[in-house]
Image (cartoon, helix red, strand yellow):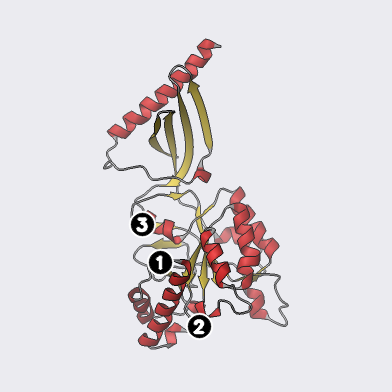
Amino acid sequence: MGKAFGRVVAVAAALVASAYALQLGDSVPAQAPAAVPEALVSSTLVVQAPAADREYFVARHQVIPLGASTLRLPILMYHYIRTPPSTRLDLLGYRLSVAPEVFREQMDWLAVHGYHPVNFNQVRAYFAGVEPLPSKPVVITLDDGYDDLYTAAYPILKAYGFTAVAYIVSSFVDQRPYVTRAQVVEMDRGGIQIASHTVHHPNLAGMSYGSAMNELVQSKQWLEKLVGHPVLDFAYPSGRFTPQTMLAVQAAGYDTAVTEQVSITHSLDDRYRWTRVRVGGGESLQDFVVGLGTSMPAVTVTSVDIETPAAPSVSRERRLRI
């Protein structure tokens, strides 16, 4: 028993030593390792050596390594999360509606198959070289701020621990059938990223530069005052935009804008015309899966944390390509 325990401690010590040596010999400029979401941890080994009164925590997780100039990142586009209306009475509404049970099935598929919903703050951090993305990243966006965003989509997202991006039309807030100010604040505090979708949902492509700027700036300022922090992301109403519209979005202080054009490939240079994958009424789960495309290669990160009662943990990380 004593010999077996000694071997376990020796293995843990060797892991610590090798991880430390790898860090010292790393050719990348020294910097603090990026934090990795706790949900990404795939395995943890805990070994305790009573004589030394310290614990070794060995964990592995997968991330998209920093440095890619282009991301394969599906940005899913939803509108209503409700029972779809009749195609005979409201064909457009049907095409914009995903039933709550279907939405739950899609979120369940993402969770079971190792996808990790992220928001645009995380994408910004990736392109800035600050933090890697989790493996199989996906952005879930919901347009317009209908009341079922709060009553149907939000509870399902919370159940899976998923983040999402909600594009809010500011003048619609507190009107039926849209979300209330209190609901927007609650979702913001609950992990949903609040973004702008103009004041009145007009066709910006058909407006003058000045009128478009008014829609963009007023919506941004109103939402920022409501949630108490910067709102940096935007969605073009009905996906309509022109080069002039993109300039207005940038001048208004936004950092990204999404369209209704279809692709899963994005770069920092095209961040004012990022594409999305529409999820509407009627597609099969297989169609949903196909729309996600092929995920980017990930690397496995092995981290060793050493903890003692008198000192904070010291972490060493080792990155291996899979």
Q: How far apart are marks 2 and 1 (CA)?
A: 20 Å
- Percent of width and height locating residue 24: 29, 32
Q: What element carries label 2?
A: loop
Residue 209, by quadrant, is bottom left
- Mark 1 lies on residue: 230
Disc nearest the viewer among 2 and 1: 1
Is tag 3's residue or tag 2's residue first in the polypeptide sequence?
Answer: 3
Disc nearest the viewer among 3 and 2: 2
Is tag 1's residue or tag 3's residue first in the polypeptide sequence?
Answer: 3
- Percent of width and height locating residue 21: 32, 29
Q: What element carries label 3?
A: helix
Graded by Cα atoms within 10 Å as few (under 14), some (14 to 19) or many (20 or more), the crowding at tag 1 reads some
Q: As rendered, which of 151 and 322 lies closer to the eye?
A: 151
Q: Is residue 100 left or right of residue 114?
A: right
Instruction: Name the mark on residue 200.
Output: 2
Q: Distance between the residues labelled 3 and 2?
A: 32 Å
Q: In the displayed structure, would residue 9 be above or below residue 92?
A: above
- Mark 3 lies on residue: 127
Q: As rendered, which of 306 and 95 lies closer to the eye?
A: 306
Residue 111 showing in the rendered view? yes
Q: In the displayed structure, would residue 299 be above or below residue 58?
A: below
Is tag 2's residue or tag 1's residue first in the polypeptide sequence?
Answer: 2
Q: As rendered, which of 322 and 220 lies closer to the eye?
A: 220
Q: What residue type is labelled 3?
A: Phe
In the rendered image, the residue lying farthest to the front is: 310
